[in-house]
Image: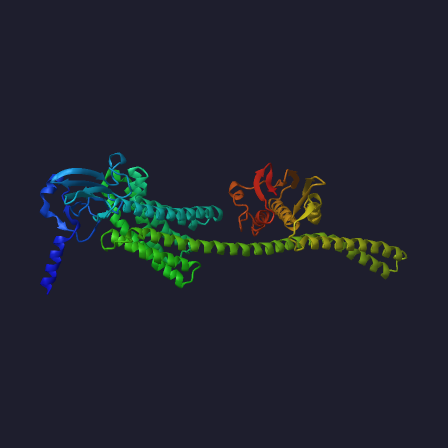
Amino acid sequence: MKFFILLIIFISSLFAKGVLVDEKYFIDKNKSLDIKEIIKKDKVFSPIKKYSLGATKDVVWIKLDFYNNTKSIFKKRIYNRTAGIDLIDVYILKNNQIEKRYKLGDFRVHNIRDNHFRVPYFDLTLQVNEKAQVYIKQKTYSPMDIKWHIQSVEDFNSYYHEQSLIYFYCFGFFSVTTILSLILFFLLKNKSYVLYAFFTIFSIIYQFTISGFFYQFGIPIYLNTIFGFSGSALAMVFLGLFPLYFFKIKKDEFKMSKIIIKVLVALLGFIAFIQIFYPLYNDILFTTKFTGLFVFLIMLTLLIFSIRLLILKKEGSIFYFFSNGIFFIFISVFILVFFGYLKFESLFYYFFAIGTIGQDLFLGFALIHSTYRLRREHEKNTELLNEYSKLSLLGQTMVNISHQWKTPINSIYNSVNHIEIAQEFRDPTLNMIIKDNLKNIKQSTNYLKETALSQLNFYKDENNIEEIKIKDEISDVIKLIDSEFSKKFIDIRFKCDDNLKVKIEKNYFLNIIMILFENSFKIFEQRKIKKPLIYLLVEKTKNKTIILFEDNAGGVSDFIIKRIFQKDFSESSSTGIGLYLAKEIVSQKLNGQITAENKNEGLSFKIVI
């Protein structure tokens, strides 16, 4: 039965019509044979069993036998889908004579390559019943692909036109995410955004290089080679560093994972670095074998790492897990096929792009989630800032009230004592004494009342913008502190136009002035300044109000002035929150800025609103 089946197949083949193609290959380990010698060694060629030979230093010859067994002219385009084959020589033989030679490959400069398209190709025309032998010599420093496809010129152009659209859609997507990430980095100063941006940039560079676009666009051979060999390594360097900054890993957390990631990142960075010098010794490029190994190991490490983060329910870990899962699956298949360990034809050439898009997309989700979380934290911190501002103001106010009330309370106490003594000793002028002291008590009590009301209005929780007279409001602050400052012989020189008005949140503005007075007061005491002086100037230019606050306390060092508005930073034993709070209020509540500099004999603060 089997015999008859084979016989039928054989007879059918005799009458079959079409273009018959026979594929064979030969590995020239000595890299010494030329086309004339190869033609004589026809028997050394073997049938092709797999199309990807992995990275090899040998020269590979492919032989394609064509026979046009049709009734029409055969005109097709023969091409290899792998763009990164470095040196390709094509010889077309008819009647045992070389009819045409093509010089292809990305290692050839553009002026000696026969076509500049992103994948190597040549055209073949056969008349009816005509035969041809095609010998293709290949040498590459990346994995060797010996599969040559046959397609009509129209279908070829249509296929690569559609492919170009897909790649440039990806390019647009990656470009937008990169720009947004860099903007967010400059706004938020979060390193994970810049790591994500550089991962995306080098992914674009690598993808467009191995797809042949950069060569087709005329990029110099050196840059094209470096991008193709080092691009993936550098992309993985930034991808490996990303979780260490995104999740803010502490020193005592994930020690082993961090060590493995850093070692692999260092190795990939080293390989990318030495490949820069390949013109000195081309075989350096064969280190791409180690690149594939280290990329696989770092992907596996990051996948395990993401699973651990997911178990611990770290913020954003769900997005990071999916990004690593998708990337690991697609890039693993890409590497295995690329190096010849797995046979996979149809969508293989898109696997790197698909894996990168998946990774990029979910990392983007993770960063969006992180940005949302930062916004919530910012809102929470703003609320805390408001509360702390109130408490700070209340504390400073109570201190000032206690100083202001000492004198009137003592005066009331003395008046009461005076009346009691006059009553006890039956003083004949008792009525006059009572009258005079009651007047004194009323004046002191009225002062206490006005002070209390002033402080109450000062502390009201009103965030509404209102128009105020700057001079009147600052003068009220000076009255509150006048008793204590006079005791220490602190001279306050205040200069402001009587009619100068500004629309502002009054309580926040006055709180800043109080903080600056309190800051100078502490420095005067600490340094025991003999003739302490504060100079306060307010002026308006166009649509800006400028407040200059200067003292003669000697200023501060350059080291301190760079950090003077930092939280919890203090030159003295104070909390260090005052000037930090002033800066936050000016920038967040008053839409202005505050700066400090050493000027004349002390420190000068400039507030621009």
Residue 372 visible in rendering: yes
Give the residue furthest to the front: 71
Image quadrant containing the C terminus: top right
Image coordinates for residue 206, horizontal then vertical, percent? 32, 46
Residue placed most toward the observer, 55 or 92: 92
**Is residue 370 shown left or right of residue 382?**
left
**Is residue 451 shown left or right of residue 62?**
right
- Name the colouring of the figure: rainbow
Image coordinates for residue 448, horizontal then vertical, percent? 75, 54
Task: Give the residue drawn at x 32%, y 41%.
Answer: 214
Image coordinates for residue 342, horizontal then vertical, percent? 23, 55
Task: Give the residue drawn at x 24%, y 37%.
Answer: 114
Image coordinates for residue 280, horizontal then vertical, percent? 24, 38
Image quadrant containing the N terminus: bottom left
Give the residue furthest to the top: 111
Residue placed most toward the observer, 61 or 447: 61
Quarter of the image where one finds residue 230 = top left
Residue placed most toward the observer, 216 or 529: 216
Residue 272 visible in rendering: no
Task: Give the residue drawn at x 37%, y 56%.
Answer: 323
Q: How many marks?
A: 0
**Is residue 152 shown left or right of residue 520?**
left
Quarter of the image where one finds residue 84 = top left
Give the residue furthest to the right: 428
